[in-house]
Image (tube, helix red, strand yellow):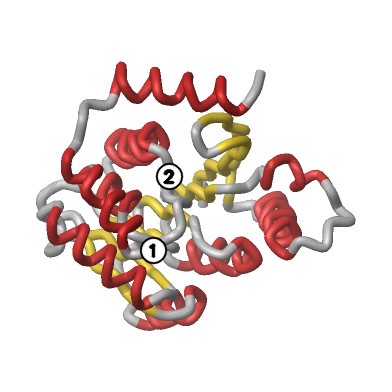
């Protein structure tokens, strides 16, 4: 099977299961018009994040990597009326686009976007001693994934769900000799998860409109 087939199947799934959504479509269009890279999650992946948050009953969500706010909208829509989402973005322009998209989605009061280097923003957030997050979605620079995981654990509780995107690297994740920092960062992420007794985790390979990739799903158990 080829990538065109994966894409066609995704398009079929999306047409069958995900109704047209002018707000999300507008977020994609504004992101493209503002020159943001086309690397946001696909619609069916956004719905998966939304379902995970709803099934889990998440009231507080942390997102590492905002981009244009497409996944942020999916996640924030899963929150109850008094829910809170904090999203971290290193690029000020991306953050401004995301804020505009969240405002258009009616979510500006529920979802905040903080600008800065991810590990610095996480350290600053931890200093505020916030209530633990129920769900953490990590989708930022891959070399920093082990550090993002460590901070996610500090900001979590038993029962917190952690999702890490883009962990297959088109299959390159199995190449221990790779010189690609995104591959090595992903491999160090898996080493960190395997060595962490507080986590139960699995990884799932995916194919679709975004190509060949996958994600980690982990549960903080103690």
Residue 211, above or below 61: above
Q: Position of residue 197 (x, y in %)?
A: 64, 52
Q: Residue at x 10, y 50 (%)?
A: 81
Q: Secondary structure at mark 2?
A: loop
Q: Secondary structure at mark 1?
A: loop
Q: Is the residue under label 2 in contact with that under label 1 (CB below 8 Å)?
A: no
Instruction: Locate residue 179 relative to residue 218 in the image: left or right.
Output: right
Q: Position of residue 175 (x, y in %)?
A: 84, 48
Tell which of 80 and 24 is nearer to you. Answer: 24
Tell which of 208 and 65 is nearer to you. Answer: 208
Q: Residue at x 36, y 36 (%)?
A: 43
Residue 102, above or below 22: below
Instruction: Locate residue 38 relative to residue 170 in the image: left or right.
Output: left
Q: Residue at x 36, y 69 (%)?
A: 94
Q: Number of numbered discs present?
A: 2
Residue 104, above or below 75: below
Q: Which residue is mark 1?
A: 35
Position of the N terminus by quadrant: top right
Quadrant of res 112: bottom left
Q: Which residue is mark 2?
A: 41
Instruction: Locate residue 127 relative to residue 211 in the image: left or right.
Output: left
Quadrant of res 91: bottom left
Residue 83, above or below 90: above
Q: Position of residue 182 (x, y in %)?
A: 68, 60
Q: Position of residue 198 (x, y in %)?
A: 58, 52
N-terminal-most mark, 1 or 2: 1
Circle nearer the viewer, 1 or 2: 1
Tell which of 91 and 176 is nearer to you. Answer: 91
Q: Residue at x 30, y 17 (%)?
A: 16
Of all residues, the one furthest to the front in this rendering is 33
Quadrant of res 179: bottom right
């Amino acid at each position: 099977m080829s990538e065109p087939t994966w894409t066609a199947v995704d398009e079929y799934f999306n047409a069958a299961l995900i109704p047209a959504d002018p707000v999300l479509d507008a977020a994609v269009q504004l992101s493209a018009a503002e020159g943001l890279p086309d690397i946001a999650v696909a619609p069916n992946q956004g719905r998966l994040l939304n379902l995970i948050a709803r099934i889990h009953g998440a009231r507080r969500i942390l997102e590492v990597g905002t981009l244009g706010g497409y996944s942020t909208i999916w996640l924030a829509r899963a929150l109850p009326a008094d829910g809170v989402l904090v999203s971290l973005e290193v690029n000020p322009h991306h953050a401004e686009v995301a804020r505009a998209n969240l405002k258009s989605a009616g979510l500006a009061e529920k979802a905040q976007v903080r600008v800065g280097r991810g590990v610095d923003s996480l350290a600053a957030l931890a200093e505020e001693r916030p209530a633990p997050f129920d769900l953490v979605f990590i989708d930022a620079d891959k070399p920093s994934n082990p550090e993002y995981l460590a901070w996610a654990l500090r900001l979590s509780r038993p029962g917190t769900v952690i999702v890490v995107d883009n962990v297959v690297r088109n299959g390159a994740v199995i190449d221990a000799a790779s010189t690609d920092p995104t591959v090595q960062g992903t491999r160090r992420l898996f080493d960190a998860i395997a060595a962490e007794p507080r986590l139960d985790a699995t990884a799932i390979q995916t194919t679709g409109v975004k190509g060949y990739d996958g994600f980690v799903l982990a549960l903080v158990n103690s």
